[in-house]
Amino acid sequence: MNAVQDFHHRSIHDRDRFWKEQAASVFWETPFTKVLDDSRLPFAKWFVGGRTNLCYNAVDRWLDTRADEPALIWVSTEVDQEEIYTRRQLFDEVNAVAAMLQAQGVGRGDRVLIYMPMVPQAVFTMLACARLGAIHSVVFGGFASVNLAQRIDDASPKVIVCADAGSRGGKVTPYKPLLDKAISLSKHPPGRVIVVNRGLFEFEPVAGRDLDYAALRKQFDGAKVPVTWLESSEPSYVLYTSGTTGKPKGVQRDTGGYAVALASSMKHIFNGKPGDTYLCTSDIGWVVGHSYIVYGPLIGGQATILYEGTPIRPDGGILWSLVEKYKVQTMFSAPTAIRVLKKQDPGLLKKYDLSSLRALYMAGEPLDEPTAQWISEGLGKPIIDNYWQTETGWPILAGQPGIAPIPTKFGSPSFPVYGFDVRVIDEQTGQDLGPNKKGVVAIVPPLPPGAMSTIWNDDARFVETYFSSIPNRQVYSTFDWGLYDDDQYWFILGRTDDVINVAGHRLGTREIEESINSHPAVAECAVVGVADQLKGQVAVGFAVLKDAGLIDQPQAAMRLEGEIMKVVDEQLGAVARPARVRFVTTLPKTRSGKVLRRAIVAVCEGRDPGDLTTIEDPSALEQIKDSL
Ligand code: AMP
C-alpha cells in the first residue's frame, strides 16, 4: 500500500478519528459533538452540532495574519481590467453586499440566485450569502431563459443578482434581457433584482423590482454584518446539474462538511499552503468554480485569480502570463482548454517564467493521453488528472501530492480520494469487481464530507436517482463506467447514461431533445453525444419532421436546421446548441420504442453499431448514416 492508499484506508476504517483530525483545519464557533450521524443512510450528517460559517473561514479568519495580502485577483481580458482585493478589502465588499441583501429581507435559509459573468461582484455576493446563512444558487452565464426559469421556479429565490452583460471573445453577451424573459416565464418571480451595471448593454430597469448594485454599494459602504453561524448540516448552496430527465437537479451542499473537505483538499490534493496563489480557469457557474475559484483557495488562506476571458485572447500565452505575473503555485483547468492551446504557437509555453508553478490539475472530462503528454512535456510539471462531479463537490479520484508524490499514469486520475469508499460494480449483479474489469463506478455510503446532502426539496429523488440503480445494494452511482488496473490506478471510461460532456460542460441529451421538439416543424428527435477532437464530445440531433417532404428540399432543410439551433440557443444557451441537426423519416428504435442511442453514436463515429436484433426498422440506421 502506498502512502496515498494508506491515508485513504484510514479515512474509511478509522473514519471518526480521521475526520476529526481533518476538521481541525476549520474554525468552529461551536465544536461538533459527533463526527457522523449515519442513522438515516444514504443521508449523512457530518460534524453534528458544530457551528461554523463558510464566509468566516474564507475571509474573517485570515484578517489577523493576511489582511493586506491579495485575496481576490480579478483579471478580465474581455474588458481589459485588473483589480486586486486584499483580504481586508474583500471583507469590506462582502459586508457591504451582505448588508444590501439583508436590506432586501434576505436572511438565513433564503435563496439568492446569481446569474453573472466572471466579475468580482459575483464572488462578493456568494460570500455575502454565506455570511448571512442564505443559500446561493449560481446559474452558469451560458444558460438562457428556459434553463434559468426552471432554476428560478425550483429555488424560488427572494432576490436575484445579475449583471447587464458578460463578454466572451470580445463579444458582448447580454444577461439582463435573458433574465427578464426567464422571470416572465417563471412561476416564482423574485421580489428584487440587483443589477451590476457594467455599461456593456443598455437596459431599462423594471420599476419597483430592479435595484442598482453600485448605488446600493455606496449606500452600505462601511457596513458590518455579523456572521450567521450555521449548524454543520444547514445548506450553503444549491447548484443545478443536468441528468437524464429534462428537469435539472438542485445539488444541495452542507456547510461544515464542505468547509472541512475543501480545507483538507487544499493541503492533501493541491499540496498548497496559506499565502499561495491559485488560478482556476473554470466558471463560477460550475462546481469547480464554487470549490476551487471561490471557497477552497480562500478557506485555505490563498489568493485566488478570477479570470474573465478565453485561453487564447489576446493570444495563447495569456494563462501562462498570469502564472508568471502572479507567481501562481497551483493551476486548475480543463482538458478542452489545453486542447485549444495545443493548436497555438508552442513557443508560448516557453515564453513565460513558470518556475512558481508546482502542478497543473485538470478535471471535468476525460483527459486524453496525447493532450496529457503534450502539456506535461511542455510545462515540465506534474499533471494531476482528477475525477469528480457536481454532486461530490470535490475529487473522488486524484493524484494527491500533498500526501505523497506517487507517479501518475497518463489517462488515469490515479487513486480514490480519502473519504470516498469507491468501488467498481457489476451493473447486473451488484457485486464488486476486481482489477481490470469494467463496471459502474459507485460509492458506498456515507458520502464523505463536502458531497451533496440531498436534492433541493426532494429527498425521495435523491435516493431514487443516485442510490437505486444498482441491484441488490444501496450504493451511490456516478453513472460513469470505470476500472482499476493491477497497480490500483483508476480509469474512467464514459457515461452509463444519456448525459454528455461538451468541452467539460455536462448536458442532458433529454433537455436538448425537449428544446428541439418545441420547434413546430419537429415531430420527434434524438440527441446523442458524438466524439469530437477538440471538445471531447458534441451534441448531434436527428429529427423527424411533421412534413417529411422537407427532407428532400436541401435549402429548406438547411434553413430549418438553423432555426432549430436558434431555438436551442434561446431556450438553453449556446453551450447546448447541437453541432448538427439532421433530418430523417424515422428514428432507430427497439420494438418496445426505445431509441437506440448507442447504435446512433456508433454510426456517427464510424464504428460498428453492434447487436441490432431488437431494432424495429433496420433502415432507420441506414438513414442516420446517409444523413451525415
Ligand atoms: P460535472 O458534474 O459537470 O462536473 O460532470 C461530471 C462528469 O464529468 C463525471 O461524471 C464524468 O463523466 C466527467 N468527468 C469529470 N472529471 C473527469 C475526469 N477527470 N476524467 C473523466 N471524466 C471526468
Image: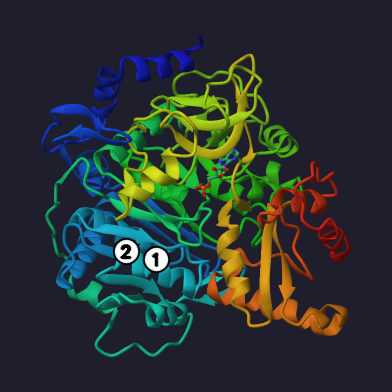
Kindly indicate the quadrant of the structure image that contains residue 517: bottom right
Amino acid on which disc 1 is placed: Arg
> Badge 2: few (under 14), some or many (20 or more) residues near its Cα, within 10 Å?
many
Q: In this view, does 540 lie to the left or right of 452?
A: right
In the displayed structure, 243 sits above or below 582; it is above
| Residue to which mark 1 is pinned | 151
Regarding ligand 1, which quadrant of the image does it lie in?
top right
Front in this rendered view, residue 165 or 601: 601
Residue appearing at x 15%, y 72% in the figure = 103
Q: In this view, does 191 lie to the left or right of 245?
A: left
Toward the top, the furthest residue is 1
The answer, for residue 602, to whether it is visible in the render is yes
Front in this rendered view, residue 217 or 498: 498
- Residue 393 x %, y %: 41, 42
Q: How many labels does the image show?
A: 2
Q: What kind of element bears circle 1?
A: helix
- Residue 179 x %, y %: 42, 77
| Residue to which mark 2 is pinned | 155
Q: Is residue 37 left or right of residue 433?
A: left
Residue appearing at x 67%, y 61% in the figure = 527
The answer, for residue 274, to whether it is visible in the render is no
Q: Which label sits on residue 307?
A: none
- Residue 52 x %, y %: 18, 41
Front in this rendered view, residue 154 or 413: 154
Amino acid on which disc 2 is placed: Ala
Work out which quarter of the rendered image holds the C terminus and state it: bottom right
Coloring applied to the structure: rainbow
> Badge 1: few (under 14), some or many (20 or more) residues near its Cα, within 10 Å?
many
- Is there a contact, CB below 8 Å, between mark 1 and mark 2? yes
The span from disc 1 to disc 2 (Cα, nearest Å) is 6 Å
In the displayed structure, 547 sits above or below 391; it is below
Q: What kind of element bears circle 2?
A: helix
